[in-house]
Amino acid sequence: MKKTLEQLNKLVELRVIEKYAIGGGIAHFYYIEPSVTYDLDIIIRIRSAKNNLAPLTEIYEWARLNNYEVKEEHIIIENIPVQFLPEYNLLIEEAVNNADEITIFDTKTFIIRPEYLMAIMLQTNRSKDRERLLLFFNQANYSQSVFEKILNNHHLGEKYELFKKKYIDE
Amino acid sequence: MNYSRKNISMSKVIGKIAESKIKYHLSSAKATFEDKFKVICALQEIDLEFRKNNPHKKIKYYYRVWAK
């Protein structure tokens, strides 16, 4: 993992990407009890995509030059399958802007804050998101006021009310 | 977490988690991320073993475990 994180930081140094933050399962398990996951989701901001229809072109080129295998939607970086996800909506952009700088495995990195992860789970609303969101309410150290502000800014208040009614208030 | 799947013995699960050197809760307040990462790797091994015995399940990165 340490080597993988170092390579991600190198992508920023090389200006292949402008900014990144860990999202997905690994970010969830930073805040709550861990479960199985097989990939490392990295949300990225690309400086100026030369090819807007294929924004990951430069990353794949970097992977090829560094002999990192590409397998389906992942690039295997130092033995860990990494999925690069360009920011795809305003909530994700804001989440990356506000990502926390942390140190894990003696390496500096960036991670999406819990309130944003919770809002993203509410927005995507797959069964595993609902399951993990409940764990966040029970285990994560988060700010309810920050979470509600994010929900209001991104029109997720109604979804939250429905979620609470169905899974929390019962 | 659901450990009730067929072909996975509870003792193996417990053994793997003990191996990860986490002696009590895995909640964020009690374990570092590095500890949790060891658990994720141990759970991967268990999950992959399950899938090996259940080939109809989708196998992804069957040959890789992050702990290596």
Image: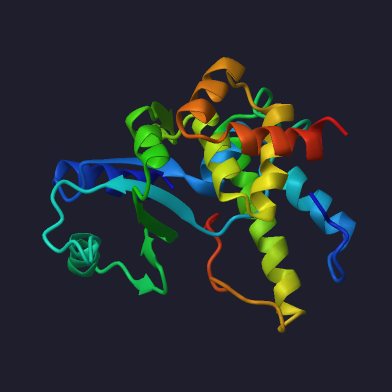
Q: How many marks?
A: 0
Please report the residue visible at 58 percent of the width from the left and 35 percent of the height from the top: A118
Relative to B12, say whether B55 is above or below. below
Q: Quadrant of residue A92?
A: top left
Residue A2 visible in image: yes
Q: Position of residue A16 (x, y in %)?
A: 17, 51
Q: Would residue B55 appear left or right of A169 to someone viewing this image?
A: left
Please report the residue visible at 59 percent of the width from the left and 31 percent of the height from the top: A157
Q: Would residue A6 appear left or right of A140 to someone viewing this image?
A: left
Q: Would residue B9 appear left or right of B66 to someone viewing this image?
A: right
Relative to A136, say whether B2 is above or below. below
Q: Quadrant of residue A159?
A: top right
Q: Quadrant of the C terminus of chain A?
A: top right
Please report the residue visible at 42 percent of the width from the left and 74 percent of the height from the top: A72
Q: Position of residue B43 (x, y in %)?
A: 69, 55
Residue B26 visible in image: no
Front residue of this view, candidates A73 and B21: A73
Please report the residue visible at 62 percent of the width from the left and 21 percent of the height from the top: A141
Front residue of this view, candidates A27 and A156: A156
Q: Would residue B25 appear left or right of A62 to someone viewing this image?
A: right
Q: Position of residue B24 (x, y in %)?
A: 78, 31
Q: Position of residue B1 (x, y in %)?
A: 79, 49
Is the image coloured rainbow, by chain, by secondary structure, or in one colour?
rainbow
Q: Residue furthest bottom?
A: B56
Q: Quadrant of residue A143?
A: top right
